[in-house]
Image (cartoon, helix red, strand yellow):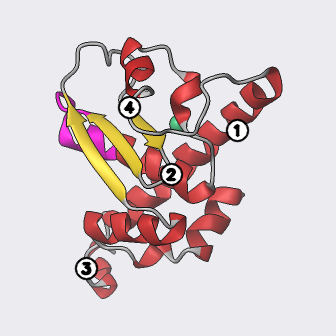
């Protein structure tokens, strides 16, 4: 599976902190990642959003979500970036997303055709799977030998 291959290829099992992960995603993609917490009531059905422009990635997260739930969305968006997927902005209907698309100099189009819609389901599955692998890695103790205590 592509998610597992990407996990191994990029050495994601080595990450131990959120900072490690953000740095690694920056190195893999060649662009810095900027995180933005918002409490916009227009962001009703979208828990996390990744927007890419020519200089950076921006990941927008809902401020009102619980921290662990926000982390889940963040890892999902990081997974899309690592896997080289297009941004999610064409797949969602929130009014906020349409507004955020007008910021900066994003190059992605919101229009997707039928073939891409089929790919989108695969992309979402891959991103979810890789996000799970990332979360499991971050839940390890700093020193892997400490895991022996848990049997
Ligand atoms: Zn997604």
Alpha-carbon span between mark 2 and mark 1: 25 Å
Mark closer to the chain start, 4 or 1: 4
Discs 3/4, front: 4
In the rendered image, the residue lying farthest to the right is 115
Q: Which residue is label 3 attached to?
A: 142
Mark closer to the chain start, 2 or 1: 2
Discs 2/1, front: 2
Residue in front for this viewpoint, 66 or 78: 78
Mark 2 Cα-neighbour bin, 10 Å: few <14, some 14–19, many ≥20: few
Left or right: 64 in relation to 34: left
SS at mark 1 in the image = helix
Mark 3 Cα-neighbour bin, 10 Å: few <14, some 14–19, many ≥20: some
Q: Are marks 3 and 1 in contact (CB under 8 Å)?
A: no
Kindly tell me whether mark 1's CB lies below 8 Å from ligand 1.
no
Q: Quadrant of the C terminus?
A: bottom left
Q: Which residue is label 1 attached to?
A: 122
Q: Which residue is depicted at the point 63% across and 47% down?
A: 85
Residue 56 vertical placement versus 90 (above, below): below
Q: Which residue is depicted at the point 44% across and 64% down?
A: 25
Q: Which residues are magenta?
A: 62-72
Q: Which residue is depicted at the point 62% across and 42% down?
A: 86
Alpha-carbon span between mark 3 and mark 2: 35 Å
Kindly tell me whether mark 3's CB lies below 8 Å from ligand 1.
no
Q: Which residue is label 2 attached to?
A: 54
Q: Which residue is label 4 attached to?
A: 103
**Residue 87 included in the magenta stretch of the image:** no
Q: Are marks 3 and 4 in contact (CB under 8 Å)?
A: no
Q: Could you say where residue 116 lies in the image, as x and y percent from the top left?
A: 76, 30
Question: Dividing the picture into quarters, in which one does residue 73 lie?
Answer: top left
Mark closer to the chain start, 4 or 2: 2
SS at mark 4 in the image = loop
SS at mark 3 in the image = loop
């Amino acid at each position: 599976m592509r998610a597992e291959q990407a996990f191994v290829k990029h050495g994601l099992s080595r990450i131990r902190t959120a900072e490690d992960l953000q740095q690694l995603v920056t190195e893999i993609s060649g662009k810095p990642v900027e995180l933005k917490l918002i409490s916009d009531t227009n962001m009703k059905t979208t828990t996390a959003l990744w927007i890419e422009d020519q200089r950076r990635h921006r990941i927008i997260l809902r401020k009102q979500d619980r921290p662990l739930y926000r982390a889940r969305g963040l890892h999902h968006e990081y997974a899309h970036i690592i896997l080289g997927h297009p941004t999610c902005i064409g797949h969602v209907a929130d009014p906020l997303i349409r507004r955020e698309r007008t910021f900066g100099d994003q190059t992605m189009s919101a229009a997707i055709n039928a073939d891409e819609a089929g790919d989108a389901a695969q992309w979402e599955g891959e991103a979810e799977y890789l996000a799970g692998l990332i979360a499991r890695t971050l839940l390890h103790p700093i020193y892997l030998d400490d895991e022996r205590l848990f049997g």
